[in-house]
Amino acid sequence: MTLPRVLGLLGAAALTIAAGWWWLVFRQVIDNGYMSLSGAVLCAGTSSAACDLAMALCGAKHPFGIETYSANLFWLALASLFASLAARTYTQLAD
């Protein structure tokens, strides 16, 4: 398996996990009216006082006990996907 493929698969898996993690936390935040969907989507890639406050106010029981979200995995996934694209482009240009 080539490096671009491995990076792409890891990035896709990490992005899927990050999206699931975000949904586990922010679904309750949205359902309870602490934040709109458009506002919560911004929290997928950023950490702001509004996102932190909405998570803290939610107080709902979340599946698996996950009550906070961190955007680090989201950015790691994007970095892996872009590295995959760069490695694939480099490989094609080198041939």
Image: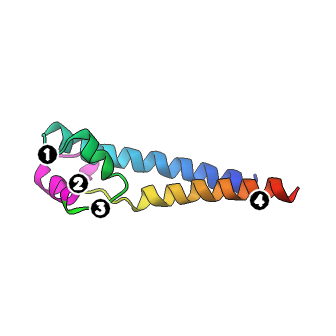
Q: Position of residue 82 (x, y in %)?
A: 60, 56
Query: In terms of sequence position, does the residue under pointer 4 or pointer 2 come before the other?
Result: 2
Q: Could you tell me which secondary element the residue under label 2 belongs to? A: loop
Cα gap from disc 4 to disc 1, whole angstroms: 45 Å
Residue type indicated by callout 2? Glu
Furthest residue in direction right, as rendered = 95
Cα gap from disc 3 to disc 1, whole angstroms: 16 Å
Q: Residue at x 16, y 53 (%)?
A: 54
Query: In terms of sequence position, does the residue under pointer 2 or pointer 3 come before the other?
Result: 3
Query: In terms of sequence position, does the residue under pointer 4 or pointer 1 come before the other?
Result: 1
Cα gap from disc 3 to disc 4, whole angstroms: 33 Å
Residue at image mark 2: 67
Q: Residue at x 25, y 46 (%)?
A: 39
Contact, mark 4 vs mark 1 (Cβ under 8 Å): no
Residue at image mark 4: 90
Residue 66 as seen in the image, left or right of residue 87 = left
Crowd rating for badge 1 (residues with CA inside 10 Å; few <14, some 14–19, many 20+): many
Q: Could you tell me which secondary element the residue under label 1 belongs to? A: loop
Residue at image mark 1: 34
Depth check, front residue: 43 or 15 = 43
Residue at image mark 3: 47
Crowd rating for badge 4 (residues with CA inside 10 Å; few <14, some 14–19, many 20+): few
Residue 80 as seen in the image, left or right of residue 51 = right
Residue type indicated by callout 3? Ser
Q: Is any part of residue 63 visible from this angle?
A: no
Cα gap from disc 2 to disc 3, whole angstroms: 14 Å
Q: Residue at x 46, y 59 (%)?
A: 75
Query: In terms of sequence position, does the residue under pointer 1 or pointer 2 come before the other?
Result: 1
Q: Could you tell me which secondary element the residue under label 4 belongs to? A: helix
